[in-house]
Image (tube, grey):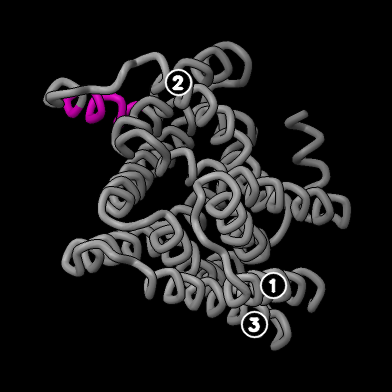
Amino acid sequence: MGDWIVSIAGTPTGAFYATLLALMSAVAHASFGALQKGAHDPWLTRGSIDFCLVLISAPVALFMVPWPTQQTAFILAGALVIHFGYKLTMALAYERAAYTVVYPVVRGTGPIVTVAAAAFIFQEHFNPAQWFGVALVSGAILLLALRNLSEEKIDPRSLKIGLAWALAGGLLVAVYTTYDAWGIRQSPNPFTFLAWFFFITAMDFPTLAYLRYRKMANPPRPGPLLLRGIIGAVIAWFSFGGVMVATYLDKVGEAAVLRETSTVFAALIGWFILGEKVGPRRLILMSLIALGAVFVEFGG
């Protein structure tokens, strides 16, 4: 499989599969975000997910793919630091503000920064139609966040802090998307990078979650939390793994923007599963996000 992925990178076939993987990643990531914001404390949920990620990734990393080279190991160490910062900001944001406010802010701030970084690092270039699509996606996502924000009833100070962490998370999305795309391209085998990425970067939050769990006066039952972790770990492989392979096969910027259609799926999840409101204005903004993604994908 690894050799086949390498062989189609940069080809029309690779571009086709990159589009499918980016859209699959969008659906998975929206589900992942909703899972972290669900019934349990976001710190415990993330810790449970990462614990299960270590368990399911270890056999793949240790026995099923070639071991990383020294260069890949150094790149993975950098990924550990970046993703820890991202997970930290997300937990802090979800702790203070609603999922439908936090998620669009995080996803809306990333695409333009990622596309600009990809132009500098990977020499990718977007034409005016594609830049219009990027602006449409990011603008509609942020307007969706403002719309959701207008209905928030929580303490204003807590909301501002949550939004600040969400903005920081969005910037880190751009950083890790660009860094991971560069890292997987440096690895001789893309699946070596993926397997060791999930194994290494999931080792931090289980410890934080365990310490938090011990301090709780009424900690939740571990069974449902572990079940949520198993589901989240499987989703994470599709979400983060899908977009990383997409950036390996084709343009980093296009994959990053297409993945932000996750905001549309997140709104639908918030509506149908979490019981959050979605009115006609949100539906219009969701349509604009999808339209922007079309411009980015087919405008070139």
Please report contact status of discs 3 and 1: CB closer than 8 Å, yes or no. Answer: no
Q: Nearer the viewer, residue 93 or 111?
A: 93
**Which one is closest to the eye, mark 2 or mark 3?**
2
Dominant secondary structure of the residues highlighted in magenta in the image: helix
Find residue 224 and report its horizontal and vertical position in percent.
42, 20
Q: Nearer the viewer, residue 202 or 274?
A: 274
* Residue 112 visible here: yes
The kind of secondary structure element at disc 2 is helix
Residue name at image x 43 percent, y 33 percent: 73
**Which one is closest to the eye, mark 3 or mark 1?**
1
Q: Mark 2 points at which residue?
A: 52
Q: How far apart are marks 3 and 1 (CA)?
A: 17 Å
Q: Which amino acid type corresponds to the residue marked 2 in the rendered image?
A: Cys
* Residue 119 visible here: no
Q: How far apart are marks 2 and 1 (CA)?
A: 35 Å
The kind of secondary structure element at disc 1 is helix
Find residue 141 and report its horizontal and vertical position in percent.
53, 71
Q: Mark 1 points at which residue?
A: 287
Give above or below for 23 relative to 273: below
Magenta stretch containing residue 208, yes or no?
yes
Q: Residues within 10 Å of mark 2 (few under 14, many from 20)?
A: many
Please report contact status of discs 2 and 3: CB closer than 8 Å, yes or no. Answer: no
Find residue 28 and report its horizontal and vertical position in percent.
61, 43
Residue name at image x 57 percent, y 64 percent: 278
Magenta stretch containing residue 186, yes or no?
no
Residue name at image x 56 percent, y 67 percent: 118
Q: Nearer the viewer, residue 191 or 19?
A: 19
Q: Which image quadrant: the C terminus?
A: bottom right
Q: Name the residue under label 3.
A: 131
Mark nearer the N terminus (2 vs 3): 2
> Which residues lie in the magenta part?
203-212
